[in-house]
Image (cartoon, helix red, strand yellow):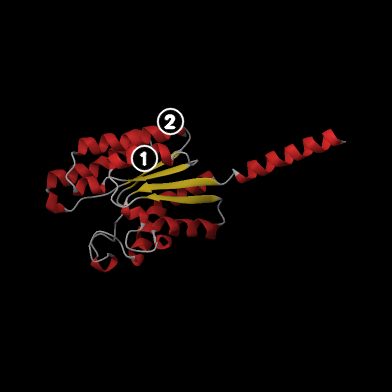
Amino acid sequence: MRSTMIIWLVFCGAAVAEEADSTRTVLFYGDSLTAGYGIDREQAFPALIQARIDSLGWDFEVFNAGLSGETSAGGLRRIDWILRQKVDVFALELGANDGLRGIDLKDTRANLQGIVDRVKAKYPDVVLVVVGMQMPPNLGPEYTAEFKGLYSSLAEQNGAALIPFLLAGVGDRPELNLPDGNHPTVAGHKVVAENVWAVLGPLLEQMR
């Protein structure tokens, strides 16, 4: 009787653990745009995505791994630490600070690819999302075009979904940005969340 009870408890414990692990994770890995610079973190777009998921009753948990000021090189340095967290969907939002600092785009691309490589090595079945960014035209047409194309080529090379431009409908509207002109307001993050959901939502629905 005692051995039967032990087996039953072990079985139930495994079932509970399996149920606890059934929640899949969505990790947003980015800079101040992901972190929600200048507003409450709970008002940034990753939290809005979580609220959308919850409203649908889907079993996904969103993690905001945004860090203000992060560059692609910084992201590559800290990715192994971040990947201690189980990841089912990995959304990569980095590179804007590289562009603003004039970093060679070959280095930016190499760093972003390095991040993707490490994510895929640790979690081979991960669903990848590349979050596109754009630079202002004052940096010159050649640099602006090359920067924009970096994200689409990265997504294509790695079989990732692409959000063409995170700040579409926000970047050119001063009323949706903080006084610095670079970071969305609370209202701006609501638009950003819609940009993200247009690509992410269908992916999550397929994974249910």
Q: Nearer the viewer, residue 150 or 178?
A: 178
Q: Could you tell whether 97 is left or right of 59 in the image?
A: left
Q: Nearer the viewer, residue 164 or 181?
A: 181
Residue type marked 1: Arg
Task: Tell which tag, 2 or 1, sits nearer the viewer.
Answer: 1
According to the picture, the residue beneath numbered tag 1 turns out to be 78
Q: CA distance from mark 2 to mark 1?
A: 15 Å
Q: Could you tell whether 56 is left or right of 183 in the image?
A: right
Q: Residue at 38% across / 39% down in the picture?
A: 79
Q: Could you tell whether 126 is left or right of 185 in the image?
A: right
Q: Could you tell whether 7 is left or right of 103 in the image?
A: right
Residue 187 lies in quadrant: bottom left
Q: Nearer the viewer, residue 43 or 58?
A: 43
- Disc nearer the start of the sequence (2/1): 1
Q: Position of residue 55 (x, y in %)?
A: 53, 60
Q: Residue at 36% across / 61% down in the picture?
A: 189
Q: Residue furthest top?
A: 121
- SS class of the residue under badge 1? helix
Q: Residue at 31% across / 52% down in the picture?
A: 68
Residue 22 lies in quadrant: top right
- SS class of the residue under badge 2? helix
Residue 190 lies in quadrant: bottom left
Q: Residue at 19% across / 49% down in the picture?
A: 100
* Number of other residues with Cα within 10 Å of mark 2, as a class: few under 14, some 14 to 19, many 20 or more: few
According to the picture, the residue beneath numbered tag 2 turns out to be 121
